[in-house]
Amino acid sequence: MQRIVVEACKVINCETTTIALREGNRWVIKYSHRFPQEVIGLILTDKEAPHMALAARTKKPVAINDTYSDNRVDPEVMKKYNIRSTLVVPLITKEGVIGALSFLYHSATVAFGEAEIDFANKLGASISLAIENARLYAGQRNIADTLQGALLVVPQRIEGINFGYLYRAATDTARVGGDFYDIFELGPDRVGMVVGDVSGKGLQAATLTSLVKSTIWAYAYDNGSPALIITKTNEAVVKASPQELFVTAFFGILDMRSGVLSYCSAGHPPAIIKRKSSETFFLTTNSPAVGAFSGLSYINNEEILGKGDVLILYTDGVTEARRGSEFFGDQRLIGFIKGLKSLKARELPRVIFNEVTSFSGEVLSDDIALLTVSFERPLATLIN
């Protein structure tokens, strides 16, 4: 907007330009260029700026060649700011008139011709469209931020474990992505955890994310295995979502008393376990993605998670981060994690993310979600 008042002043060859926005029944100067006095924030009523009120009422430009002899202006205001001639264009959106663009002359009167009025009118229309788009974008971004935040809410703490999480969108404009994570208690000694990636972006992907998370939550409380829960989730997704959308997901249930991690990895990048001894390996992944077809078979797997071991769950935005034509890749990821010294699960997502963005030059080709989990106390303490 500031660039507009500067460039418009040059093109029409006036001495001063301002943009005033309508706030209630008042005009507030928000932008100005080369005005002799400081006017940003100046508030004018319709009585003090009747020429602006006229432009708003008629929704047409108002050209005043001599402000000292024209009853469409307040002469006292004109003299106070030494305005001899002014051309005012209303800024109009679907909501109505939201402001006014003014071209001003101070040193002498000017007779406005058709060319100046036509230019000002077209510029006003362009500014109005820009403001309309900016407001729509701001509203959609607020919805996106709120929705994304709601989909990524996790407990502040779960007794007995330490966990960390991180989500980053690949671009600032695509705030709502399809990557998600969750961790939740299923009772005094069982914890559910999920990381997934919905194909697609935007509200449609967010809707499917909500469906997947809610369905997993609902079935998880029935004490079924992760494979059974994912099987039921697949049927729900197939029936409720478009065929072109699908979900990759890792869903696990950790038995806090035995340390047994029962899990189903449905077309998802393989989770990683880093032992306290520094042994690091991928978990088996052998089930299809969710939502592609009905009647698919899902497999349950198990692994022991001991004190000091860390489970790392992530989406493919991590391994598919690029530097030129080179991917960050599975082996680079597991090698980096294996080389890390003692590090709490809560801190690990940030450390991994920093390594990935350092590799890719701070550019992400896809969204990233990370969830890391470890026992906070010895199993014996939990059993007692």
Image (tube, rainbow, N blue to C red):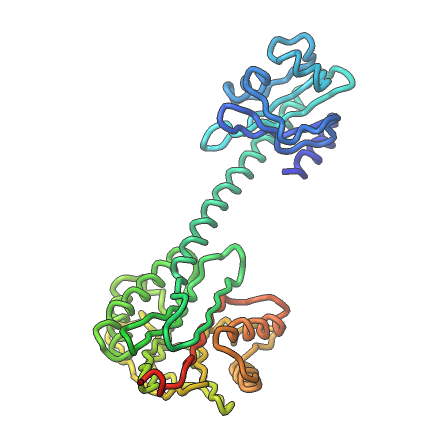
Q: Between residue 16 and residue 237, name the one nearer to us.
A: 16
323 vs 344, left or right, is: right
- Placement of 164 over or under 21, stated as above or below: below
Q: Residue furthest front?
A: 384
Residue 128 sits in which quadrant?
top right
Tally the marks: 0
Q: Nearer the viewer, residue 293 or 321?
A: 321
**Is residue 165 or residue 250 the one in the foreground?**
165
Q: Reply above or below: 181 against 6.
A: below
Point out the residue furthest to the left here.
Answer: 222
- Whole-percent x, y for residue 244 in the image: 36, 65
Q: Position of residue 10 (x, y in %)?
A: 74, 32
> Does residue 255 appear left or right of residue 27 in this picture?
left
- Residue at 39% of width from left, 65% of height from top? 154
Q: Position of residue 377 (x, y in %)?
A: 41, 82
Residue 12 sits in quarter: top right
Answer yes or no: is residue 184 visible. yes
- At 27% across and 77% down in the image, what residue appears? 296
Residue closer to the observer: 242 or 330: 330
